[in-house]
Every structure is written in C-alpha cells, then in structure tokens.
Amino acid sequence: MGFQHGLSGLNAASRNLDVIGNNVANVNTVGAKSSRAEFADLYANSLSGAGASFSGIGVTVGNVSQQFTQGDIATTSNPMDLAINGRGFFRMSTNGTITYSRNGQFKLDKDGYLINGQNGRLTGYVADANGNINVGVPGDIRLNSRDTAPFATTNAVVSLNLDARATVPTAAFNVNDSSTYSGATSLTVYDQQGQEHTVSMYFRKNASNTWDVHAAADGAPISATPVTQLGFNTDGTMNLTATSMPFNLTIPVGASAGGTQTMAFDMSKVTQFGSLFGVSELRQDGFTTGRLVGFSVAGDGSIQARYTNGQTLNQGKLVLSTFANPQGLAPLGGNQWAETVTSGQPLVGAPGSGSLGVLQAGALEQSNIDLTGELVNMITAQRVFQANAQTIRAQDQVLQTIVNLR
C-alpha cells in the first residue's frame, strides 16, 4: 500500500462528490439530466506485462456520463411551455449555431420568434401565409400575430325536413305573412370584405311532392319568383333527377363589395317526411376577418393560431432531434448540448414520428434527478473519501515506524 493508492482514491471520491453535488444543485432545473461518475482501476505496465502478481496502483474516474431517462412531466399555466414525452431534443438555433435541449421553457421575442432563456430560437418546419407547412430544412419558427383576411362564401349546405302533411297555400307568397309558406330558416354568409349578410329561405308547398324556395337577403326579397324548386320521391327523399343540386344564388352585397355575390347552395339532403319542419344542418365556408386569440401546440408539433372568427391557421411545425448515442453529446450549460463525433449525426423529424416522442403543451419536463438517492450516494462518497484518507494515514504511520528504526 502506497500513498498513490490513497491519493487516487481521494481524487476519485472528490470527483464523485462534485458530480453528486451538481446533481443536487440541479434538482429543480427543468429538463436537467443526472450524471454519474464511472470509476476504473489502475494498473502499472511492465516489460513482462501485467499479471496476477501485480496489485493495482489506485483508481481513476474513467468517465462522467449523463443519464437521459425521462423526467416527470408537470403542467403549467403557460401555453408556450412544452414537454417532450419520450425520446428527442428541441432543436435550437443561435445565430446559425445549432444546439439541443430538453428544456421547454419558451417565450415570444419582439419579432415573434419562439426563444429560450439563452435567446436561442426554436426551429421547425415553416408555414407560408396560407398555413401550408413546407417540410424540408428546418428554420426558425416565427409566429405571426396579424389579422386573418376574410373569405367570401362560395358554398353553403342546407339540410332540413319539410312537413309532408302541409297544404298548398291559397294566398300569394309574402315574406311578412307566415301563412303563405310552411317553414323558413336563415343563414349568415360573408362577402369578400368580410361583411355579414343574412340569407333567409322560405319553403312553400306548390303541389304534391313539389316545393318552391323563395329567398331574401338582409330582409329584402331577392326576386318575386322562387329561386329554385324541390322535387321529392314518394318515400320523402329528394328526387335528384328532377331537382338540380347545388343551385346558384346571387345576392346583393353593396357596391363596395362588388355589388352582387353568387354562391352555390346544396339542398340535396332535404327530406319531406310526415313530421314537423326542422333544420338539421346549416353550413357555409365563408368567414369574416379575425383577430388573434392565441396559439396552441399539438402533440405532433403543429402550431396553430386561433382567431376570433373561429378559424385556425398553421404557423409551423416543431421538429425534434435524436441521436444514436445521446451520452456522446457535449454539455454546454444552460440546459443545452452540442453534437459531437461520438454522439453521431442528429435524426430530425416531427414529434411522434419514428422513435421520437410527442409534445405536451402547457407542461414542462422536470429533472430526472432522484434527490433521495443522491443524498444516500453523498453519504457513501463521503465515507469512501474518509476511508482513502485513512489509507494515507496508515501508510504515513508505517513510514514513520521505518524512519524511527535504530
């Protein structure tokens, strides 16, 4: 036994305490991964080679490796917080330098980019102005807060039941006289400027299995004659041979919006059964302009903007990166890692694809450090340090005995 054995043991135990102390310090660090000291024994080389007759000359810390196991996921009140459930890293860009992180604490900067605490930009597949996501080389994700443009109604669907027991009115059709028709419904449509218009439809029985449809726009009749006529089979279903669907309806929308607007109405699902008049579906594809309400992130990384008009628009799609050997990544601090030769090249893809995990919005991945286990490891490492100190003391006493020989 020599001083070198005890000294190497003290160095290794001290390094182990450093690793444990770093783990304990990062218990509350979002996305932090625990590390462990991996020890290796030391043997001296000789011309005859090492053998069973040689005792070791101490210990060394062969490696400090990080453990990339999943941490607990805790919900937050911030919709921009993101947690990865499974494998993968967020791909960050700082002035073109790519780093990787498990910390999902993101926020918007003044330019609309999603950034982390080190001002690195979150990357993904960028969407164009129409919400089409361009899958290719990932770029910096930028969220647009501008209003959405309106979309003029081009198609509408009306589904309802006309009472087969209704009789043919004797008086001429009059919008203001409900006795001249057997049912009415209204639908809100939009012109190209996003202005609302109310299209009302009045259903008047003309003959057996035949109905006239009159229409009004914003309370004013569109024409004195029916805009279309509906024919039914004897079983109450629409006779699509005698009835042309969809039919075009032109309504006035004002000079500023072009004067008139034509839209296609589909009433092929209208029925004539022996029950009361009832509407089952009113649907159209137009909408007015919308102001931004907020953003949401789906499990597959899709970022959507929500607007006051009920519409959503894709703003991009986040990507994750995974590595063949995550333990080969170089820690940079600030919850970030860099690619190395040992880690291998990153495999980039959308969350949920391949072996990549999924995202959970409004949540954060906590560190995977077990505080109880680290405190127990600290006690063990402290005792190991004391034991190695005792070996140095024992060697000192042996040497002192030899020196004192007369």
Image (tube, rainbow, N blue to C red):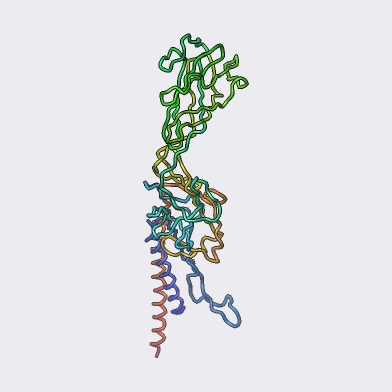
Residue closest to the far bottom: 406
How far from the left and from the top, in percent, is residue 258? 46, 35
Numbered label tally = 0
Q: Is residue 227 above or below residue 110?
A: above
Task: List x then y, in percent, for residue 391.
Answer: 42, 75
Tell me, yes or no, if residue 155 can be seen here: yes
In percent of the image, x 41 and y 26: which residue is there? 218
The residue drawn where x is 51% and y is 52% is 125
In the displayed structure, would residue 45 be above or below residue 27? below
The residue closer to the viewer here, 170 or 319, is: 170
**Left or right: 187 as drawn, with respect to 347:** left
Can residue 379 be seen at all in this image of the molecule?
no
Q: Residue furthest right?
A: 241
As rendered, which of 97 and 238 lies closer to the eye? Answer: 238
When asked about the image quadrant of residue 176, the answer is top left
Quadrant in the picture for the C terminus: bottom left
